[in-house]
Image (tube, helix red, strand yellow):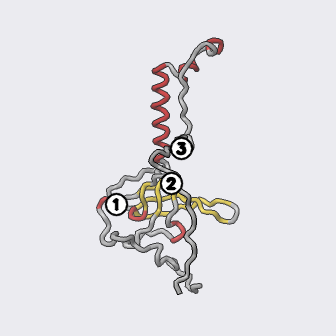
């Protein structure tokens, strides 16, 4: 167990640059626009020591609350004891990137909205809300499912034995070669 307690103690592999990622920082890193409310992932870039996060925040996700020309302020929730503390850290843009954690949700919202609009135009489930309740019993509509469905089991199938005769598998008998 090491006996050093520095600011960057035990970060030998954590702050190491990835394979084929050494060298100067790419220009595209500085051309990304950050806005207040954006969700960002914090990943320290060891080639830039200025504005570098503490090792605790490496790999965390937070929300941008402040934007300056070369840095962003990020809110990160830290577990301390039995509560969460809202920590505000200021990081240079080399150490943050846009998070993809909400992208699947946003795609699902868009696809659900499109399916909803298509059903309404077709006279589907959404059109039912405008009908009086006594007409609902005679109104037949196509129902759309907006829920995520788990992976279903494979379909049933029949294996032909025409060119696939069953074989009896037995272990090879033990044989000494002494």
Taking the image as shown, residue 83 lies to the left or right of residue 157, namely right
Q: Position of residue 142 (x, y in %)?
A: 53, 23
Q: Are marks 2 and 3 in contact (CB under 8 Å)?
A: no
Q: Position of residue 68 (x, y in %)?
A: 40, 58
Q: Are marks 1 and 3 in contact (CB under 8 Å)?
A: no
Q: Position of residue 155 (x, y in %)?
A: 53, 41
| CA–CA distance in space, label 2 to label 1 | 18 Å
- What secondary structure is found at the residue carrying circle 2? strand
Residue identifier under label 2: 63
| CA–CA distance in space, label 2 to label 3 | 41 Å
- Neighbour tally class for label 3: few under 14, some 14-19, many 20 plus, Cα within 10 Å: few
| Residue 118 quadrant | top left
Image point (49%, 28%), residue name: 116
Image point (44%, 68%), residue name: 44
Chain-order first, disc 2 or disc 3: 2
Which one is nearer the viewer's eye here, 96 or 132? 132
Question: Which numbered marker is on residue 154?
Answer: 3
Residue identifier under label 1: 29
Chain-order first, disc 1 or disc 3: 1
Quadrant the N terminus occupies: bottom right
- What secondary structure is found at the residue carrying circle 1? helix
- 38 is higher (above) or lower (below) than 11: above
Image point (43%, 55%), residue name: 98
């Amino acid at each position: 167990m090491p006996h050093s307690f520095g600011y960057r103690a035990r970060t030998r592999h954590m702050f190491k640059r990835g394979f084929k990622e050494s060298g100067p920082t790419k220009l595209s890193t500085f051309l990304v626009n950050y806005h207040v409310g954006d969700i960002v992932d914090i990943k320290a870039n060891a080639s830039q020591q200025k504005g570098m996060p503490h090792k605790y925040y490496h790999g965390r996700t937070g929300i941008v609350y402040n934007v300056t020309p070369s840095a962003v302020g990020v809110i990160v929730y830290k577990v301390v004891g039995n509560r969460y503390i809202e920590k505000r850290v200021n990081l240079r843009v080399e150490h943050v990137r846009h998070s993809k954690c909400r992208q699947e949700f946003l795609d699902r919202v868009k696809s659900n909205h499109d399916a909803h609009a298509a059903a309404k135009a077709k006279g589907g489930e959404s059109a039912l809300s405008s009908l009086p309740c006594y007409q609902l019993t005679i109104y037949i509509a196509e129902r759309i499912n907006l829920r995520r469905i788990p992976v279903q089991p494979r379909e049933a199938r029949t294996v032909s034995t025409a060119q696939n005769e069953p074989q009896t598998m037995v272990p090879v008998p033990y044989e000494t070669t002494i």
